[in-house]
Amino acid sequence: MGLNGVVRCRCIQDGLAKPHPFPERLALDDTVDPFLTGDPTLDDLLVHDRWFDESCPHQGYIVQERLGNIRAIAHVRELLGSLESEPTPRFPILLGKVVYNGVHCGDHLSSDGSAELLKEVEQASRFRNHWDVSDSEFFAGLRRLCEASIATRNPIVF
């Protein structure tokens, strides 16, 4: 178990994906996840899933990152907590929306939120001398997610 993050590509949004088998029923949710409207059958869902896997060269994702296992995320949370300042918190998004739990899923952060998160990642980088290898990997992966989110204007999905 652990924490992963993804940013979807823009191929579906920009009309660059392969034609969908049920275009009139294709919709995107807040995380840009494609789904079928109406009451799809199991066969419809299987066809849709097969289409998504082959919809574009990115297979729907521009960046996919394994941020760490539950222990590594707990370590990052403790590290950031030790660097937190009062009365103005340094890492409200990192602590409140990213590492608050080492296995959360289904959460997402808008591209505007990703821009703010990137500022926190850059601020945390000032404390590199406190990092171990897993911390460096965590922050490098999170930076890639933020940059992809900002570039695509799509959310980071955890």
Image (spheres, rainbow, N blue to C red):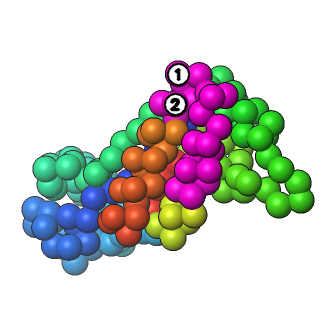
User: Which three-letter amino acid code belongs to the residue tagged 2?
Assistant: Ser
Q: Nearer the viewer, residue 43 or 2?
A: 2
Q: Are marks 1 and 2 in contact (CB under 8 Å)?
A: yes
Left or right of residue 129: residue 28: left
* Label 1 crowd bin: few (<14), some (14–19), many (20+), radius 10 Å: few
Asked if residue 40 can be seen in this view, the reply is no
Q: Is residue 133 magenta?
A: yes
Residues drawn in magenta: 117-138
Location of residue 4 in the rendering, given as x and y in whole percent from the top left corner? 48, 39
Up-down relation of residue 81 to residue 119 (above or below): above
Q: Is residue 30 magenta?
A: no
Q: Which residue is drawn at the image coordinates 79% and 56% (left, top)? A: 89
User: Which three-letter amino acid code belongs to the residue tagged 1?
Assistant: Val
Q: Nearer the viewer, residue 7 or 141?
A: 141
Location of residue 90 in the rendering, given as x and y in whole percent from the top left corner? 73, 54
Which of the 4 image quarters holds residue 34?
bottom left
Q: Which residue is drawn at the image coordinates 45% and 62% (left, top)? A: 155
Location of residue 39 in the rendering, given as x and y in whole percent from the top left corner? 37, 67
Left or right of residue 55: residue 147: right
Seen from this angle, which residue lies furthest left?
18
- What number of labels is visible? 2
Up-down relation of residue 72 to residue 22 (above or below): above
Give the labeled residue for mark 1.
Answer: 133
Secondary structure category for the residue under label 2 = helix
Q: How far is mark 1 from mark 2, CA to CA?
A: 5 Å
Q: Nearer the viewer, residue 4 or 141?
A: 141
* Type of secondary structure dominating the magenta stretch: helix
Q: Which residue is drawn at the image coordinates 13% and 67% (left, top)? A: 16
Which of the 4 image quarters holds residue 19?
bottom left
Give the labeled residue for mark 2.
Answer: 136
* Label 2 crowd bin: few (<14), some (14–19), many (20+), radius 10 Å: some
